[in-house]
Amino acid sequence: LHKPESGAALEPAADDLVSLTAALKRKPPGGGDAPVASLREVDLGQSGGGLRGAFEFVAALLAGEECRVQKLALSGVRSASVEALAALGAALDGNRHLEQLSLGCNFISAEGCRALAAAVASHPALRSLSLEHNPIQDSGAAALSAALCGRGSRLTSLSLPFTGAKDGACRALADALAAGAPLASLDLGGNLVTAGGAPPPPPPPRPPPPPPPRRPT
């Protein structure tokens, strides 16, 4: 966790996340905002063998109007059950400030991805979503593609490398883009995409017509 004013970092142990959430949301005795109001970035990534309760902690942290976190990273915490992702999705549904969400390397399944997709579809501020190295497969990518077509979607960057995506994911994403999805950056590196899922090459340019025959003078 980083406070932009001081640059100080907090590194909670797994068993301390519940008490940390309470402390961040507790208003000082003399009045004023709770500490969570000054947080702009939360990073719980790469927590060794996994950080138990990380998704539940973040869901509780994001809930409530006082949370102004703009950048959230939970890469490599390895605790992303479907229930945890549903809780995160519910918290995102009431959140209005998060702009970047990184959830790489958490064993997120296609079902877990579907639990998250609805919140992505309607979030008014989320611009960037990273799900690299999660086995979401084609059906998870299709759920995200459908979310991109939602009227409330503001997502402009989607990162899905090494997610088991195949040609079906490419077709779903192509349909979303054709329907007006606002994506400006899409990463599908390291996936099993064949020529059938890649867009066809443009036709070669036609040669210029030959000049008309010269009339004899």
Image: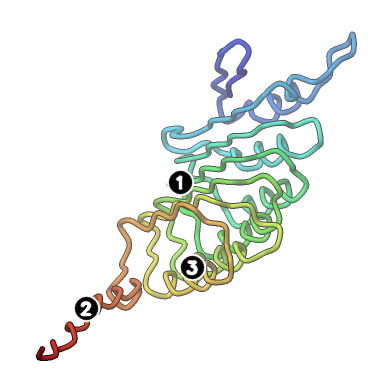
> On the rendered structure, is 97 left or right of 1?
right
Residue drawn at (20%, 79%), measured in percent from left and top? 207
Amino acid type of the residue that numbered disc 3 sits on in the rendered structure: Leu
Crowd around label 2: few <14 · some 14–19 · many ≥20 (10 Å): few
> On the rendered structure, is 100 left or right of 75?
right
The single residue placed furthest to the front in the displayed view is 217
Where disc 1 sits, the SS reads: loop
In front: label 3 or label 1: 3
Residue drawn at (43%, 75%), measured in percent from left and top? 168
Which mark identifies residue 104? 1
Locate residue 5, reporting x and y percent: 63, 13
Q: Earlier in the sequence, mark 3 or mark 1?
A: 1
Residue drawn at (42%, 37%), measured in percent from left and top? 49
Crowd around label 1: few <14 · some 14–19 · many ≥20 (10 Å): many
Locate residue 72, reporting x and y percent: 58, 36
> Distance of mark 2 from mark 3, alpha carbons?
36 Å
Q: Is residue 32 above or below residue 209?
A: above
Q: Which residue is mark 3?
A: 173
In front: label 2 or label 1: 2
